[in-house]
Image (cartoon, rainbow, N blue to C red):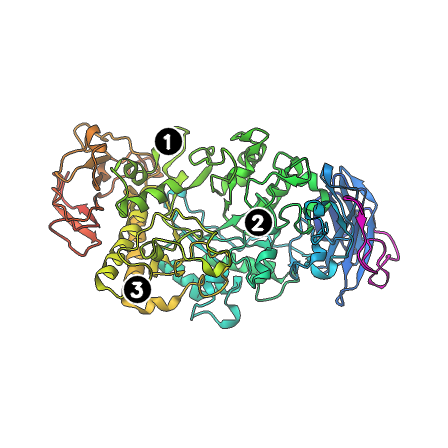
């Protein structure tokens, strides 16, 4: 057999009618409507209950709608109506809870990107619920994975039926108008984000009933909600909750994709996080979670992965988009046989195509209007803005979002890079978008480990990163500041490990970055040395205080506020176990409880004082002649910093925020006024006598070394409030 010929493997596995496993329906579907896409249950004007099915499949030759009964028996209904490349039909009697999928017929010609294979049962891209799991069985592949000539294996069609081994789409009825819900609508400048994993945050929480741990209902439980409210955060950023699949290499090693950055269903909440069922019940459970968080004043932001899917490279499974229209959904490469991979995950969705932009924007609108969410963080967002010649900030996808009357009003956060050439775009996204600012992360880490030659970069990061965002007409809250995130060391591990320890991931230490910018304070890993432990706790206070006192939007990673550790694993994406789950027992230890209390106190201070969360960049000017400038930088000698001082090697900096010089006005147009604060930072190895600027007296609100007066201790931070006149 030569490459490209069709291969039929074993009896009963042909894409032709599958005998007892499938049979033709007694009557064809009614014509139905070509929009909206997906499966929509409704009452036909004749009064007949039923479901309209619509699937965009641009180059397909035929489409079969496949229904599955409770015993897994399949009934195939050819969709004969096609309008604007959308295949559609209405089936009377099909009600919510019905499982279904599609088989799409067309050419098999991998050299032109054509990979239609009707032997593969495909997930509806618009499915709003998914039942079952993708097993990773070899029959899920559109091509033969174990072909004896590996270099051409992707060109040999595999005709085994994949239906027994894949999850099924589910018909869902949704008539929720959200009239009983009040969105918090927290202004960007007042936002404090808490990044968490639905499962990891709840799995070990002692106040959540065991049956609800690891689920949306667990996160909605009063024990979880009250903790978040007590901490003071205003938004949770959930790691991916779109339906996702596990990579084959993880399954072979007995692992799973814990983080979930392997989406396959952009409208369906991941069924594995449902306590109530997966035949549509997960939709209602997710909504109840959102409502519970909204009642507590907490917004819900979703981490979304529209840059690639779980179908991987050309040797990956055919689960949905590949089998519907491979060339219509993905960026093809390698002579159209393979993919242009700007994500590191095997494929990249082609947002130059209108049907891809529609898929993504329809999904976003669905999660806002019907699921109640308040914003999105876009994984590898630069990949979504790639045109034919690189990343383009006037890209059709970005334009579609910015002009959308709904999406332009929610929180939009870009992870402003991908893995391709020219993909690093920090500071490059247009207005309306905020960005994960990794320059803040790297600068703050380097400063506190003593790895920066001067304080120029730190000055920019503390004051809102005007060098990145001001020129484009953006605001300080375009910068989402973080020191840690799900990807990398936890805050505790950042001060406990110099090297990653990822052996449990089964990749011989090849995974995870080696550029951690961490410092173990003198001992690798856990230590009982009192001096090491004291320094580590001080560094934790330094890092958390710097994050929460800087201009911009702070993001805390769940558990960092009380010492969560991953044992030095900086890439725990496949660790669905106690390595990743938040260990709530740490709050029983006084040192970790104190860190949590400090975090809550800093968030409260930030909320109470607008000078610490300004909406506009500092001007360096006074509000009135002869008054203080809104921002002044000081040397340890108490002198205002000159241009030369910024280039002088030092690890000490003073920052005075003048509440009397704020440029902002309140909602009635009156000038905002606040207290003034002096922030002193010393990352050097020795104590420093810092001469306080004139205008006191000063009241010490925080000293990470526990010394309220006198010299500024080595590696410490002090926050003072000016309690006298200016």
Q: Residues within 10 Å of mark 2 (few under 14, many from 20)?
A: many
Residue at the disc numbered 3: 593
Outermost residue toward the right in this view:
26
Most foreground residue, 496 or 705: 496
Residue at the disc numbered 2: 367
Give yes or no for residue 8 being in the magenta stretch. Answer: yes
Q: For numbered disc 1, what is the local secondary structure?
A: loop
Decide: is 166 above or below 688: below
Q: On the rendered structure, is 20 left or right of 173?
A: right
Decide: is 158 above or below 633: below
Image location of residue 306, percent across then percent down: 57, 44
Q: On the rendered structure, is 44 left or right of 503?
A: right
Which span of residues is magenta-colored?
1-29
Please tell me in which quadrant of the rendered image residue 71 appears: bottom right
Determine the CA span between mark 1 and mark 2: 31 Å
- Image point 37% across, 69% down: which residue? 585
Residue at the disc numbered 1: 470
Q: For numbered disc 3, what is the local secondary structure?
A: helix
Q: On the rendered structure, is 565 left or right of 378?
A: left
Give yes or no for residue 342 being in the magenta stretch. Answer: no
Mark 3 and mark 1 lie on one chain; the one further toward the N terminus is: 1
Mark carried by residue 388: none
Mark 1 and mark 2 lie on one chain; the one further toward the N terminus is: 2
């Amino acid at each position: 057999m030569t490459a490209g010929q069709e291969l039929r493997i074993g009896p009963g596995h042909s894409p032709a009618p599958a005998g007892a496993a499938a049979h033709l329906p007694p009557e064809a579907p009614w014509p139905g409507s070509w929009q909206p896409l997906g499966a929509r249950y409704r009452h036909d004007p004749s009064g007949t209950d039923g479901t309209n099915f619509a699937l965009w499949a641009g180059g397909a030759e035929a489409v079969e709608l496949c229904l599955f009964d409770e015993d897994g028996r399949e009934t195939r209904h050819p969709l004969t109506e096609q309008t604007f490349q959308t295949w559609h039909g209405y089936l009377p009697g099909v009600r919510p809870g019905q499982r279904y999928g599609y088989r799409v017929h067309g050419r098999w010609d991998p050299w032109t990107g054509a990979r239609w294979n009707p032997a593969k049962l495909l997930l509806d891209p618009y499915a709003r619920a998914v039942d079952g799991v993708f097993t990773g069985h070899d029959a899920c592949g559109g091509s033969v994975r174990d072909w004896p000539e590996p270099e051409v294996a992707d060109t040999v069609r595999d005709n085994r039926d994949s239906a027994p081994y894949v999850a099924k789409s589910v018909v869902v009825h949704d008539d929720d108008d959200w009239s009983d819900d009040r969105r918090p609508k927290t202004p960007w400048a007042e936002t404090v984000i808490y990044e968490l994993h639905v499962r990891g945050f709840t799995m070990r929480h002692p106040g959540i009933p065991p049956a609800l741990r690891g689920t949306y209902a667990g996160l909605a439980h009063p024990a979880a909600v009250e903790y978040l409210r007590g901490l003071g955060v205003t938004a949770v950023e959930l790691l991916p909750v779109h339906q996702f699949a596990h990579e084959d290499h993880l399954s072979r090693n007995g692992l799973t994709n814990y983080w979930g950055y392997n989406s396959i269903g952009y409208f369906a909440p991941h069924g594995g996080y449902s306590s109530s069922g997966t035949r549509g019940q997960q939709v209602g459970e997710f909504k109840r979670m959102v409502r519970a968080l909204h009642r507590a004043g907490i917004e819900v932001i979703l981490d979304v992965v529209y840059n690639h899917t779980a179908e991987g490279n050309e040797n990956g499974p055919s689960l949905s988009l590949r089998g519907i229209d491979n060339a219509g959904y993905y960026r093809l490469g390698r002579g159209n046989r393979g993919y242009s991979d700007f994500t590191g995950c095997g494929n990249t969705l082609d947002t130059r195509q209108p049907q891809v932009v529609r898929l993504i924007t329809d999904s976003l609108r669905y999660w806002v209007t019907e699921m109640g969410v308040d914003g999105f963080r876009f994984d590898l967002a630069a990949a979504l803005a790639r045109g034919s010649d690189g990343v383009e900030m006037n890209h059709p996808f970005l334009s579609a979002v910015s002009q959308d009357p709904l999406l332009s009003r929610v929180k939009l956060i870009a992870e402003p890079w991908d893995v391709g050439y020219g993909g690093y775009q920090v500071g490059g996204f247009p207005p309306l978008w905020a960005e994960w600012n990794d320059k803040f992360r790297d600068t703050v880490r380097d400063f506190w480990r003593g790895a920066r030659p001067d304080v120029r970069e730190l000055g920019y990061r503390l004051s809102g990163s005007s060098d990145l965002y001001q020129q484009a007409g953006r605001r300080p809250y375009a910068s989402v500041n973080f020191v840690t995130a799900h990807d990398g060391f936890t805050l505790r591990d950042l001060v406990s490990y110099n090297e990653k320890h990822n052996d449990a991931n089964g990749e011989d230490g090849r995974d995870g970055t080696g550029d951690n910018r961490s410092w173990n304070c003198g001992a690798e890993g856990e230590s009982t040395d009192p001096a090491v432990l004291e320094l580590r706790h001080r560094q934790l206070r330094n890092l958390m205080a710097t994050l929460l006192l800087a201009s911009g939007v702070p993001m805390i990673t769940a558990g960092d506020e009380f010492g969560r550790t991953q044992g030095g694993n900086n890439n725990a994406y496949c660790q669905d176990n106690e390595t990743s789950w938040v260990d709530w027992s740490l709050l029983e230890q006084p040192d970790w409880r104190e860190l949590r209390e400090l975090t809550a106190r800093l968030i409260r201070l930030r909320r109470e004082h607008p000078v610490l969360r300004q909406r506009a960049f500092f001007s360096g000017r006074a509000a009135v002649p002869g008054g203080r400038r809104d921002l002044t930088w000081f040397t340890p000698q108490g002198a205002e910093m000159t241009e030369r001082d910024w280039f002088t090697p030092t690890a000490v900096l003073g920052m005075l925020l003048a509440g009397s010089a704020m440029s902002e006005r309140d909602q009635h147009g009156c000038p905002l006024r606040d207290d003034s604060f002096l922030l002193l930072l010393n990352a050097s190895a020795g104590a420093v006598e810092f001469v306080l600027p004139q205008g006191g007296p000063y009241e010490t609100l925080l000293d990470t070394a526990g010394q309220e007066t006198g010299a500024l201790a080595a590696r410490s931070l002090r926050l003072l409030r000016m309690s006298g006149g200016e």
